[in-house]
Image (cartoon, rainbow, N blue to C red):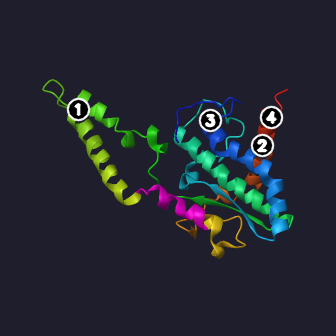
Amino acid sequence: MATPFMLSKDNIELQFATNHVGHFLLTNLLMETIRKTASASRKEGRIVNVSSRRHQFSYLEGIRFAKLSDPSGYNSLSAYGQSKLANILHANEIARQLKEDRVEVTANSVHPGLIATNLFRHYSFVTGEENIVIENYWPSQSQPYLSEAVLPIFCLKSLVGLAGKFVIKNVQQGAATTCYVALHPEVKGMSGQYFADSNIAKASLQANDAELAKKLWDFSLDLVRRGTNPS
């Protein structure tokens, strides 16, 4: 999450490759089986994409189609938001296609919440890297002015840690919304929706852009074809 700029083996920006392209390919490989199983069993199939509220903080254009793997202008948090926006757009486009084909399979996306996992290893407030700053630059008689810069960082870190006890979910709590959308009878027939805290939530305008979803679908198909047929 929010990693420094890196490329996958297929030369795709790593967060986008990990959070979207891999899921896109896996879902496509399973889709025929999902459709057949739903038809044969006469039971609703469900596809759930795990997105994030961070989808609201993607790049201004939503998806950087032309500059996806270009390091210029790269922002780690925006790139993460971009990949999470892609999760919602992907689910919405699947939902549209399945509804058009009258297949009894739904596709939705969820925001699981802020969960205590190692996804935050690139966040200094969580990893404690500020301690290094404070220890190395604590004000001395020769540099008393540093206290004005360092103390707010120390206080902010303490506040973040305290707030985290009330805001950050454990793994079981974080899995609740995903399990609800995947299994609960109340969600039967719902498709193309975005959920948070086991309720339908409001996604961004970009996340509800059907044209952007279709463009992403075609773009992702091209990425997958190039990756599976390098020649």
Look at 30% across and 31% down and name the residue there.
132
SS for tag 4?
Answer: helix
Q: Is residue 113 visible?
A: no
Mark pair 3, 4: CA separation: 17 Å
Mark 3 lies on residue: 14
Majority secondary structure in the magenta region: helix
Could you tell me the amino acid type at mark 3? Leu
Quarter of the image for residue 126 reads top left
Mark positioned earlier in the residue sequence (3 or 1): 3
Q: Nearer the viewer, mark 3 or mark 2?
A: 3
Q: Within 10 Å of the Cα at label 4, are there few (<14), some (14-19), or many (20+) other Cα atoms?
A: few
Q: Nearer the viewer, mark 3 or mark 4?
A: 4
- Residue 188 lies, with reference to residue 109, above or below; the image says below
For residue 228, which numbered disc appears in the image? 4
Residue 174 sits inside the magenta stretch? yes
- Residue 21 lies, with reference to residue 100, above or below; the image says above
Farthest residue in the top direction? 142
Q: Within 10 Å of the Cα at label 3, are there few (<14), some (14-19), or many (20+) other Cα atoms?
A: many
Q: Nearer the viewer, mark 2 or mark 4?
A: 4
Counting the numbered discs, the total is 4
- Residue 105 lies, with reference to residue 121, above or below; the image says below
Q: Nearer the viewer, mark 1 or mark 4?
A: 4
x then y, percent, for residue 17: 66, 39
Mark 1 lies on residue: 146
State which region is magenta.
168-180
Could you tell me the amino acid type at mark 4? Thr
Farthest residue in the front direction? 41
